[in-house]
Image: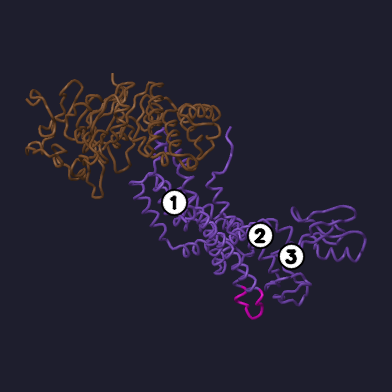
Chain colours: A purple, B brown
């Protein structure tokens, strides 16, 4: 019987990480924020959470649109739940609607007044807590969905860059010799391809008829493709260092092949050194996707994004200062928290802590 | 038939300039089943490299075998494919390393590491392999094997770790165990325990043992035969008792003289072999010991490699007239 258990050294690192209050709380906060953003449809949405209509319950948050006719309204397109709530309230017939805390969608243009010109200031009564942008879309809704996209994007970026870097680094490091010599030169040449230009060029030739999901994935691929090389050097040198140790020779002595040695013996020892870089990679990914959006080469419109909000905010700084304030605030907060996590991880993994003499 | 027969093994390492430095220069070894051969010499004389070459485990790409043959059960290991050699490693030839801390993977439990030997060579299911592992751990004297199997290497003491390494080397009951200074990193008390454990297990499985060491005490205790290496060559080879009683080569005599004895006067200075092991690039082609020898060497023996001759029954020595004590008839 083999029990699944954590290596006590890793346990010790986890305990140490938990004891670093700032980083640990930052991690918890970010983790919670990301979890909540995954369920953002329940918190920030124009669709109601629950509708009780003539004794029947409806949960419109997910799934197909429910036409207005369903609730006795005179239209066939999607129900406007904010209106419905008002109507039910006026009827006082026992029907009710429960709206999410922020009853707006990131794509929805809330032209409640016909003379609206965009840029409604933050207002508690209309529930536009952080105001609206130039097409009357709710800023908070766009921030929340933008966070979800940016963070998912960053995690995907982290995973894919590490995958490529670990694959390339361990091949170079393990086989060494000529493979390393030529492989490393290729990596160096590739890493000299200018990242920003390549992303801008490739992103701008992306066919517009692709769905936004495809465009986002393609953007992710392009970014990964032109930035995975940095981590390769670390992996390669870590593999070199580990490969020289006797336990690899000892694995070879018992007859293990290259695959087994790389995956079972080298990687577990190499990856622990890479973990410390992960939070900083996430921070870098969030800032680069925001920067690309700001320049207009990032996520396709009308995807909610922080960079796009920042751009709008900067362009309309006099008219609508709340946009740039909330977007910049959110960005700074997120990046600071991620960096706190990174610092704590780095400190928890710092071997010096375990070998000081006092 | 000898189990292992090494003929004229020549191993070189490439330096930064691309030159080959010969580390092992024409080594002959042979080992019968059940026999224990000690390979002794100073650091850097090529003992470990010779042993690693037996498993074709030279550092890639710097190290390479230039010449010679290694016959394992009459098949040349040097002409085998990597798959073939992999099926011999661990199964027919086991190896014990010097530093038990480094020889175990820090990120796996010791149980998993011993399991791996069985999983690699015996087409076993995980559960079955674990059963064998526990038996093996019991055999090498690990208390409470089923608890310890879930420990990581850093949780064990040096002696325990070396026992695990031995368990891994012996798991598949190999015919030959190569032990590269197995006790150097251990306390003296633990050394004795580990040596005893090794010879017990060796006896049980009737395996041969190639023991690499620079500790002549260990050699006297465990080996049947000894080969003394100097500068990449074997300078003397004899059964243990003969070598200790009548060493023929100046280097061997020097080694034996530099062991402190209980009967020596307390204040006496311990004899030492003058000088240092020369750098690989500076080795001469003739008698390698000449620069450190107190005897005068004829120019001939600085250039010509002295022949390896049998001076008594089973007692071989590199017959440099200045270094070796030879009978008159051998010189002719």
Residue tagged by mark 3?
Answer: A104
Which label's residue is closer to the chain start, 2 or 3?
A: 2
Residue tagged by mark 2?
Answer: A33
Q: CA distance from mark 2 to mark 3?
A: 19 Å
- Give the vertical position of A129 relative to B146 (above or below): below
Q: Nearer the viewer, residue A167 or A90?
A: A167
Mark 2 is surrounded, within 10 Å at the Cα level, by few (under 14), some (14 to 19) or many (20 or more) other residues, namely some
Compared across the picture, whether B15 is left or right of A302 comes to left
Span colored in magenta: A312-322
Do the residues marked 1 and 3 share a common chain?
Answer: yes
Q: Secondary structure at mark 1?
A: helix
Residue at image location 56% in from the left, 58% down from the top: A154
- Give the vertical position of A151 relative to B183 (above or below): below
- In percent of width and height, residue A238 lies at 42, 50
> Which callout, 1 or 3, points to the residue nearer the camera?
1
Mark number displayed over residue A235: 1
């Amino acid at each position: 019987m083999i029990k699944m258990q954590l290596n006590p050294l890793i346990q010790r690192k986890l305990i140490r990480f938990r004891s670093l209050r700032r980083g640990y709380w930052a991690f918890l906060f970010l983790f919670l924020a990301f979890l909540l953003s995954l369920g953002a449809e329940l918190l920030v949405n124009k669709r109601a959470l629950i509708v009780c209509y003539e004794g029947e319950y409806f949960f419109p948050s997910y799934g197909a649109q429910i036409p207005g006719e369903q609730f006795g309204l005179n239209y066939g397109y999607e129900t406007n739940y904010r209106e419905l709530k008002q109507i039910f309230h006026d009827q006082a017939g026992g029907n009710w609607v429960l709206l999410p805390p922020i009853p707006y969608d990131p794509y929805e243009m809330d032209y409640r007044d016909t003379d609206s010109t965009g840029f409604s200031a933050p207002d508690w009564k209309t529930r536009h807590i952080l105001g609206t942008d130039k097409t009357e879309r709710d800023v908070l809704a766009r921030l929340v969905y933008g966070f979800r996209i940016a963070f998912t994007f960053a995690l995907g970026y982290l995973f894919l860059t590490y995958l490529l870097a670990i694959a390339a680094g361990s091949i170079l490091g393990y086989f060494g010799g000529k493979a390393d010599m030529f492989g490393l030169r290729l990596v160096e040449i590739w890493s000299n391809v200018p990242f920003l230009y390549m992303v801008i060029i490739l992103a701008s030739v992306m066919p517009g008829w692709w769905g936004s999901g495809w465009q986002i994935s393609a953007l992710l691929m392009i970014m990964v493709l032109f930035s995975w090389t940095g981590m390769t050097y670390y992996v390669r040198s870590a593999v070199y260092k580990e490969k020289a140790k006797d336990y690899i020779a000892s694995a070879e002595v018992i007859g293990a092949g290259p695959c087994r040695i790389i995956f079972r013996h080298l990687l577990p020892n190499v990856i622990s050194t890479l973990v410390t870089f992960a939070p900083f990679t996430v921070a870098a990914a969030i800032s680069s996707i925001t920067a690309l959006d700001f320049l207009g080469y990032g996520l396709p419109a009308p995807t909610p994004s922080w960079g796009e909000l920042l751009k709008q905010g900067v362009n309309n700084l006099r008219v609508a200062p709340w946009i740039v304030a909330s977007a910049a605030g959110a960005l700074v907060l997120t990046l600071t928290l991620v960096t706190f996590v990174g610092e704590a991880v780095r400190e928890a993994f710092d071997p010096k802590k375990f070998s000081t003499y006092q | 038939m000898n189990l292992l027969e090494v003929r004229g093994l020549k191993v070189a390492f490439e330096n930064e300039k691309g030159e080959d430095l010969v580390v092992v220069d024409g080594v002959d070894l042979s080992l019968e089943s059940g026999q224990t051969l000690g390979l002794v010499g100073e650091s850097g004389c090529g003992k470990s490299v010779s042993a690693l070459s037996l498993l074709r485990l030279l550092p890639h790409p710097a190290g390479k075998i230039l010449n010679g043959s290694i016959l394992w059960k009459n098949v040349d290991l040097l002409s085998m494919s990597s798959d073939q050699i992999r099926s011999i490693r661990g199964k027919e030839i086991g190896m014990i390393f010097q530093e038990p801390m480094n020889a175990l993977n820090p990120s796996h439990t010791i149980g998993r590491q011993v399991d791996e030997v069985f999983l690699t060579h015996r087409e076993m299911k995980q559960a079955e392999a674990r059963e064998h592992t526990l038996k093996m751990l019991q055999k090498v004297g690990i208390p409470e094997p089923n608890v310890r199997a879930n420990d990581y290497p850093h949780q064990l003491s040096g002696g325990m770790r070396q026992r695990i390494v031995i368990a891994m080397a012996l798991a598949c009951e190999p015919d030959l165990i190569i032990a590269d200074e197995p006790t150097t990193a251990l306390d003296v008390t633990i050394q004795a325990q580990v040596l005893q454990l090794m010879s017990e297990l060796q006896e049980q499985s009737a395996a041969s043992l190639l023991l690499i060491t620079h500790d002549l005490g260990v050699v006297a205790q465990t080996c049947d035969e000894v080969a003394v290496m100097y500068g990449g060559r074997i300078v003397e080879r004899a059964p243990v008792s003969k070598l200790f009683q009548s060493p023929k080569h100046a280097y061997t005599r020097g080694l034996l003289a530099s062991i402190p004895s209980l009967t020596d006067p307390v204040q006496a200075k311990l004899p030492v072999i003058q000088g240092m092991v020369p750098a690989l690039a500076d080795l001469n082609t003739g008698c390698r010991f000449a620069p450190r020898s107190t005897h005068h060497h004829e120019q001939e023996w600085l250039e010509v490699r002295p022949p390896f001759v049998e001076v008594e029954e089973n007692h071989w020595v590199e017959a440099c007239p200045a270094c070796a004590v030879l009978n008159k008839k051998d010189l002719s």
